[in-house]
Image (cartoon, rainbow, N blue to C red):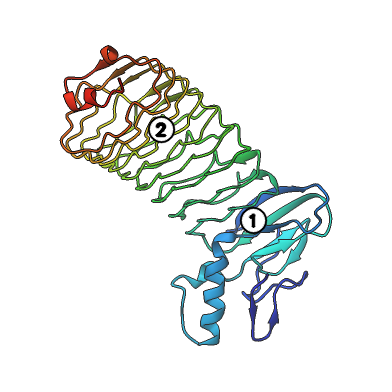
Amino acid sequence: MGCTDDTGTSGDKGTSGNMGKSGDVGKSGDGNYIIAELEINGDNKNTFVRILNSYEESVRKYIISKKRNESAYSNEDELKDGTITINNNKISFDYTHYFDKEGKYTIKYTFNHPITKADFMFSDCRAFTKLDLTHFKTESITNMWSMFRDCGAKIIDVSQFNTENVTNMAGMVEACVNVEELDVSKFNTQKVTDMNSMFTICTKLKDLDLSNFDTKNVSNMSNMFSGCESLQTLDLSSFNTEKVTTMESMFLSCKSLINVEVGSFNTKNVKSFFTMFSNCESIQSIHLSNFTTENLKEATNMFSGCINLSYIDLSNFHIKDANLVNIFLDCDKLMKSNIRTEDQKILDEFPE
């Protein structure tokens, strides 16, 4: 599973791997540290984790380029001089590691150059129970796409992340089903353009403070909170959505959501509300009087499955040729008289 070159195979403990030698592990200096606690339990002793998963493809290209004597990677410095230690044992630069017994492991990654890409870095690391990232230097990172996607950790400490240069947070903590708390209150998101599926299927996440989020450059918010079954309230009143073009499935299956504050939303450029609030089973009223629909093309199943919805304000909805199929499907407690709108096209979609 490791990377190889013409001289041998990486993965042997006590070697520096094929990427060059590094300084002594444990000295801070200008190094970039990630400290993670890994606990492996159960009968399967072949449990493994992906180590620096985001570098898998880059490392492969780097090795190939060396064989061909050409550069396939624009910033090779990020791949050089990297070391990994597991329980204080230095191992080679390898992107997967197998463990031969159960127990708790501490993994330390050290880099002598700033990391700019963290996409998929901890993706599918289901064996992690805790990620302590308080010493992880992130000021140079521009891409956090799916950084923790499907990570099994119960605690992911990103409270000290410097995100001032990040442009992509799509799927950042997607499917982190064990996380109950996540402190993103200090995130600087002024350069972020994509938040698609950022928190989707975080089924145990109970609270989110997004009051500091600057979303003026975000264009994609589809599936952003979909499947967050434990969230009861969401205050998004600080969100600037003037550049957003899709809110598709944004709150899909937020089954415990009682209140969502979207009063500041500017939807003039939004083309899709497809299943936006679908299966929000606990919500009783939705106030969208500020929503406009001049560019809307798709609203199918927008409120379907909102079984306790009894009032909805769509007073600024003016549908031209948007698809409204099943927009109120299975809204069992909603009466036509409690839909605030003057648009007959919307009222015609109400099931009799």
In percent of width and height, residue 221 lies at 37, 41
Task: Mark 1 or mark 2: name the one nearer the start of the chain.
Answer: 1
Q: Amino acid at mark 1?
A: Ser
Q: Compared to 311, does 62 lie above or below?
A: below
In percent of width and height, residue 293 lies at 20, 33
The residue at the point 35 percent across, 43 percent down is: 190
* Residue, far front: 352
Residues at marks 1 and 2, CA–CA distance in whole angstroms: 31 Å
How many labels sit on residues? 2
In percent of width and height, residue 62 lies at 53, 76
Look at discs 1 and 2 and give the one toward the viewer: 2
Camera-side residue of 274 and 47: 274
Quadrant position of the N terminus in the picture: bottom right
Dot 1 and dot 2 residues touching (CB under 8 Å): no
Secondary structure, mark 2, is loop
Q: Amino acid at mark 2?
A: Asn
Camera-side residue of 85 and 257: 257
Q: Compared to 240, does 36 lie above or below?
A: below
The residue at the point 38 percent across, 51 percent down is: 167
* Dot label at residue 212: 2
In percent of width and height, residue 289 lies at 24, 21
The residue at the point 58 percent across, 64 percent down is: 112
* Dot label at residue 28: 1
